[in-house]
Amino acid sequence: MADAFDTLGHRRALRFWGWGYADEHLGTAEEARLADLVTLVGGGAAIALPRLNDVSLAPSRGSPPDALRAICSATPYDRITHALGKSLADSLRLLQRALPAAPDWVAFPRDEAQIEALLDWAGSARAAVIPFGGGTSVCGGVEADVSGDYSCVLVIDLQYLNRVLEIDHSSRAALIEGGALGPELEAALKPAGLTLRHFPQSFQFSTLGGWVATRAGGHYATQYTHIDDFVESIRMLTPSGVLETRRLPGSGAGPSPDRLLMGSEGTLGLITRAWMRVQERPRFRASASVRFPGMAQACSAVRAISQAALFPSNCRLLDPAEALLNGVGDGVSALLVLAFESADHPLDAWLARALELVADHGGSWDTEAAQRSLRGAEKPAVAEHRQGAAGAWRDQFLRAPYYRNYLTPRGVMVDTFETAITWDRFEAFYAGVRDALGRAIREVTGVDGMVTCRFTHVYPDGPAPYFSFYAHGTDCGDMQAMLGRWQHIKLAANAAVTSLGGTVTHHHAVGRDHRPGGYDEQSPPLFRAAFAGARAALDPQGMMNPGVLIDTPQRGAVAGGVLGK
Amino acid sequence: MADAFDTLGHRRALRFWGWGYADEHLGTAEEARLADLVTLVGGGAAIALPRLNDVSLAPSRGSPPDALRAICSATPYDRITHALGKSLADSLRLLQRALPAAPDWVAFPRDEAQIEALLDWAGSARAAVIPFGGGTSVCGGVEADVSGDYSCVLVIDLQYLNRVLEIDHSSRAALIEGGALGPELEAALKPAGLTLRHFPQSFQFSTLGGWVATRAGGHYATQYTHIDDFVESIRMLTPSGVLETRRLPGSGAGPSPDRLLMGSEGTLGLITRAWMRVQERPRFRASASVRFPGMAQACSAVRAISQAALFPSNCRLLDPAEALLNGVGDGVSALLVLAFESADHPLDAWLARALELVADHGGSWDTEAAQRSLRGAEKPAVAEHRQGAAGAWRDQFLRAPYYRNYLTPRGVMVDTFETAITWDRFEAFYAGVRDALGRAIREVTGVDGMVTCRFTHVYPDGPAPYFSFYAHGTDCGDMQAMLGRWQHIKLAANAAVTSLGGTVTHHHAVGRDHRPGGYDEQSPPLFRAAFAGARAALDPQGMMNPGVLIDTPQRGAVAGGVLGK
């Protein structure tokens, strides 16, 4: 790979066909456990892993002007690692050594002036522009395969805009650049005793700008569920110029400008910086792992907790199948990982009341462990929250994306999707989604798969269930067949979630994968028209991330309109 | 008035030139106290109050089709009570018996089909349409004085769409019609043990749809500050058709459709119903009235509480001037009204920790009263929160809008504006706004006024200060002169808030009055362009509430654009 690796990016080399760094590997124990899963679900021997120069690339089209040439790369590594996100489908395509398309150029701007120059060039060259943070999209959000009248595809990677520019300790806020990775911004906040405390599963590899653009879900199970809640103001570079919102703790002046930019998924412009609400690092913790005789009681308890205004930081319910698969269940009982944390006060009263609600609904827990969690507040390294079922689950949470590196080449299909639904409809929804998914898996693979569910976030009016499925992809190394099976199941999942009343995505974003049968059905047509109207003002040529969220209007039509002038 | 009162509306007759019902009057004790204020600020004898037929109206233009004639009124009462909102300026204009303009027709539709028919007629007749909830706007949000190429002005009053259609007890949510007044919807929720618990000062006379359209501020000082936080989904009738968002507890699917509609202030369409998050009625309360030696310590304490994740329901800080004027201060100390409430659990731990923070910053309180507040939890009628300084303040809060009925005709100018600012800038902001306001009052009246401040809501990153000013308007009954003085002071307030970094409105909305020097300066130009683009998709003719929020594009220009087709 070395010869092709003369990237202009400064970051450690990534595994281009899967998750993580190229030189980072699974441990022996992890592989042994995953081998069991291959046996259980039914896979085969691993196919040979691709090397970078196995992937053939068409010559780059277009040509950046001399002034920008030094920040634009067309190396195979840069083009291939910026061609797709990190979904299962993306891996399958790269394991086949075939890319539907790669960007012609990957730019690594050092500042906003360079981004503006890139947008100017792209506009005059009729190039499509794809903003790129960490590239961890699992829904086709950063894809160079654009349709339409574009002369070439330019990816703009924001990795050099990765600083924390300013900290306002009094207001507990920080001005952070859009390209900062999770660990980068946390490292910069830590000396001040502060944290953004937004930990999506992709934390290590995703960026602030990406989180804001996709309305990422983070650490908190309640109250501050999306990155949205931490945004004070946003600065976005659009093809029409700079859009910077006013930094305020709250406002009621017209529709919120920030809320139009959040979730725009690169279709309006690039987020170069944002003022974010940060927090003091937590000093007090309380937690319990609660077992329920079944899912119904567990849901009742979680509903009661979600409506009690206690605001646990973690309220993660594992359904019987999920608990079993994670080694903490018996296949019948459901497990609730309940935790509170505070930078300000001991949490005894909070935990005590939550456990009263748990007891009301038939939950049981280790009283001494719960007590230890309170006593361990000042010594987080040994506190209960890192031990036991809760601790085991947390480790697995952070490692889970790596497991696909083992499973996918062996023909085991593992994928997840997340949603949200009101409590009144949850029971039918939970049954209906699992049925539809199980049926789709059987239809396309001929055998049963596994479907598990957990709640990642909960609201007073409903949970955000997160489904995982495990299915037989192929045992003969046919990655194309596995991709076809995945597409069938994915469409069935979108359709089930839509027909049963959920949202097609609670925090993974829409991208391309959640459009058919999902976003295209769920979003009000007049809202899409309104959003297209707003977009036409910011991106008159329709060059920003075409194909994501909504169809990009034909260039001629937009350019002729009033707003496109 | 009776002869002119053949309205098609069913509601009790309102005082057309001021606040409240026409047959509702101030008490003797209230009037005595207000007389002292007239003496203090310097007013004169009351001018004769206007009668309805003192106000001359031009004949109504346009003519609703026969099918709609039965729901369209052109009586003087309906036209005059729907011509303006309830700001001081609105009162001054009506006390002069002069209206810049009145709507030609006021429609009282009974259902959505009638609203659609009204929009169709308005579109074909080139009429301007003004959605009307309770008409309590204090910022020029419902004004018949529209500029542009409109054949006539049609106000659509939603008062017959005032039902709670459905209650989902499991998810604690209710489907409520847009025209429901605060007391109407609370009365419908009460038998189910539920409450929306959104109590703006206008509660008695304002509607759910109006709250959502203007992003109203409500009961809670923290966390659920705006009505926004309670919205699950919205149904809006726009000139382009129905826009109904999906009912969900949370979602990350693209930019939030609800957030585009919230704050649109009637410029996109009419909100006919919304699924709202409701709550069980609180059973537990805890409160304390805290005195601080000065404003600086009080602010430090409030900041600490706001950042401690304790989420008080009330955290209302009265600055020394505000406390003094409310009869609970000495002109130096600041008063904090602190309260917690819960439907789920006793609040001892919450109050105790908040009072520790208060003590850290030099606050003092009546320990026994705080204890009584906890014990009184099950007997709200005698609980501490309705007694003492907190209780006195609450009564005044609800009565305050009525006081203008006494003060304005006597030439005393009382007005308020609200904003929000981050903590790091608050000290300079507080000093700068009071300076600018005091200077503007002196410039225009020749004498000193009074400026007071309280926090209505607080966020971890900053407070929402609410300023009141009292100024000598006129002592010779010249309401036109008083209006001129008010305009000068209002522009100075907008300019000061803008230059010092605050928002021009935290929850009163933008309307017309907050545009010059305020919203027009503060909102990002590209956001306004994007919003105009969105609006063009929903209201191609630009007929909805023209003049509010943004300029309405010329009809010809829009109609020729792609989005206007």
Image: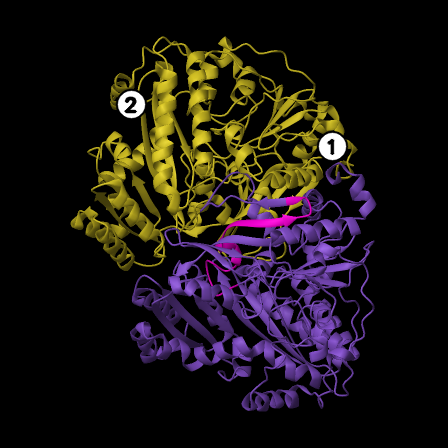
Chain colours: A yellow, B purple
User: Which secondary structure lies at badge 1?
Assistant: helix
x and y percentages locating residue A82 in the rendered image: 54, 23
x and y percentages locating residue A309 in the rendered image: 36, 57
> Which chain does the residue under circle 2 lie in?
A
Q: Which residues are magenta?
A: B218-241
Residue at 65% across, 29% down: A552
Q: Is residue A533 magenta?
A: no
Judge by depth and name the residue closer to the eye, B560 or A261.
B560
Q: The C terminus of chain B appears in which quarter of the rendering? A: top right
User: Which secondary structure lies at badge 2?
Assistant: loop
Residue at 34% across, 15% down: A446
Judge by depth and name the residue closer to the eye, A331 or A384.
A331
Evaluate whether residue B199 shows in this view.
Answer: no
> Which chain does the residue under circle 1 lie in?
A
Q: The N terminus of chain B appears in which quarter of the rendering? A: bottom right
Residue at 35% across, 48% down: A313
- Residue holding disc 1: A558
State whether discs 1 and 2 lie on one chain: yes
Image vertical order of residue A34 relative to residue B430, above or below: above
- Residue holding disc 2: A27
Image vertical order of residue A520 relative to residue B208, above or below: above
A538 vs B333, left or right, is: right
Q: Earlier in the sequence, mark 1 or mark 2?
A: 2
The amino acid type of the residue labelled 2 equals Gly
Few, some or many residues within 10 Å of mark 2 (<14, 14–19, 20+): few
The amino acid type of the residue labelled 1 equals Val
A55 vs A534, left or right, is: left
Evaluate whether residue B250 shows in this view.
Answer: yes
x and y percentages locating residue A34 in the rendered image: 28, 21
Determine contact: label 1, label 2, CB under 8 Å.
Answer: no
Q: Is residue B238 magenta?
A: yes
